[in-house]
Amino acid sequence: MNQINSFKDITVRLNNKFENSILGKQAKNIEGNFRDYDFHTINEVRPAIKNKMDGLQREHDVYEELEKQYSYEKGYSIIPEAYLRDKDGKIVKDFISGEARRIDFIVVKDDKVIDSIEVTSKTADKTIQSAKEERIRDMGGNYIRDNHGNIIKIADTVHTRIERRD
């Protein structure tokens, strides 16, 4: 992946990574049709896009570091955006928020999860997200699908570590 340097870079990245997301569609529309938006709308969307650009760059940087630390040649797999699932492979939703939990990166070797990483900014409060993850894990959401679709159990000793970056 290349560094994100422009609005066009984020638009391409958003369209590739979040093809059906609302933000991806907004970014695509804004790039092509600035005249269709008043300044209020543009000023609301710009900080969201800047935040998304920064987040994607952080994820990219961490992924590159994980690739060096956990190389494919040594039998590791890095699974991006893995949903917490039950033993049957169904996505488990938190009973309070009604939301699922997707971990930024899960590292697997020999059909065992050995690392779980959440990438975020230095200032983001992850208390609510961490609590949601714990509730989902308590409800049986202790599995993920690997890159081949196999169900892999997350050991009770593996907890998601938060990787904070500028």
Image: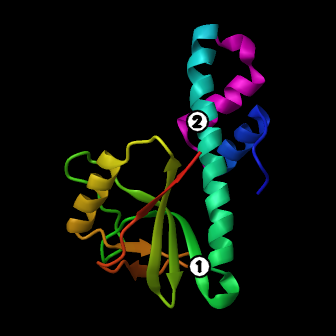
Image coordinates for residue 64, horizontal then vertical, percent: 69, 65
Residue 151 appears left or right of 47: left
- Which residue does the numbered mark 2 point to in the structure image? 51
Q: Earlier in the sequence, mark 2 or mark 1?
A: 2
Q: Residues within 10 Å of mark 1 (few under 14, many from 20)?
A: many
- Amino acid of disc 2: Asn
Image coordinates for residue 123, horizontal then vertical, percent: 46, 40
Which quadrant of the view contains residue 139?
Answer: bottom left
Depth check: 13 or 132 in front?
A: 132
- Which residue does the numbered mark 1 point to in the structure image? 77
Q: Main secondary structure of the magenta part?
A: helix
Secondary element at tag 2: helix
Image coordinates for residue 96, horizontal then vertical, percent: 20, 47
Secondary element at tag 1: strand
Q: Is residue 47 above or below residue 120?
A: above
Q: Which residues are magenta?
A: 17-38
